[in-house]
Amino acid sequence: MKLFSKDETFFDHFRGLAVHISEAATLLRTLFENPANAAQISVQIKKVETDGDAIVHLINQRIDTSFVTPLDREDIHMLAKRLDNVIDLINGASRRVVMFRVTAPRDGGVQMADVLVRAGKEILQAVGNISKRQRMMEHGRAVKMLEEEGDVLYAQAVGALFEKDEPAIEVLKWKEIFDALEEAIDECEDVSNTLESIALKNS
């Protein structure tokens, strides 16, 4: 049985944002594999981020104009904000690579970006199954496990910065880049928590 029978447009918009997360994460992984091309790839990520902002704008307009919404208005707003935050943080990580003039890949960067790609796929599946609580929760659990994997990779990557006698500037640059990646992965878990809370409220 479907939990939600009202206006489906919101769910189409959520799926749209989730697709944008996957696109941005895939581009980010490519950027970390080929940081020499970061300037061009970051432009593509910025476009995905701008498109995501436009979807959030549509969601907010619809919240204001819809007489009946399929979920609590604050839940719709929160989920849209969380999904958009992931895209913003991915954009922030790509901007740092460009800003710090990074030209060579480094252990940890590609792996953490890959966690984001996999988390993006789980979020897309969870949002697509928002009316099927059990399946949505399974994807949510997968996101939590990916967040833990991201934490381990972050600790290894940052630890490795201090193992050798690295120039201080390299340590500073990469520490900030790894922080940005970890923040984006953490935000994926926040999306998952928001979805879980919505599922519990509407079950």
Image: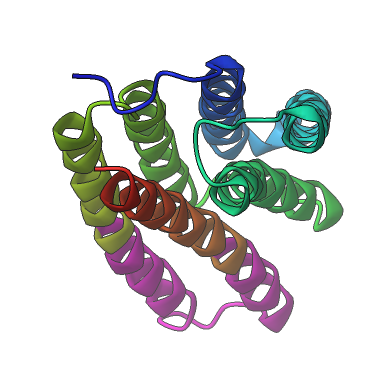
SS majority, magenta: helix
Position of the N terminus, as image quadrant, is top left
Q: Picture quarter containing residue 175?
A: bottom right
Evaluate whether residue 107 shows in this view: no
Whole-percent x, y for residue 51 in the image: 79, 24
Q: Is residue 58 left or right of residue 164?
A: right
31 or 167: nearer the viewer: 31
Q: Is residue 101 magenta?
A: no
Evaluate whether residue 156 shows in this view: yes
Q: Is residue 171 magenta?
A: yes
Q: Is residue 103 left or right of residue 29?
A: right
166 or 19: nearer the viewer: 19
State the residue at coordinates (56%, 18%).
7
Q: Picture quarter containing residue 21?
A: top right
Q: Is residue 129 left or right of residue 102?
A: left
Stretch of the chain drawn in magenta: 149-178
Whole-percent x, y for residue 196 in the image: 31, 51
Whole-percent x, y for residue 18 in the image: 52, 28
Whole-percent x, y for residue 93 in the image: 67, 52
State the residue at coordinates (62%, 33%).
31
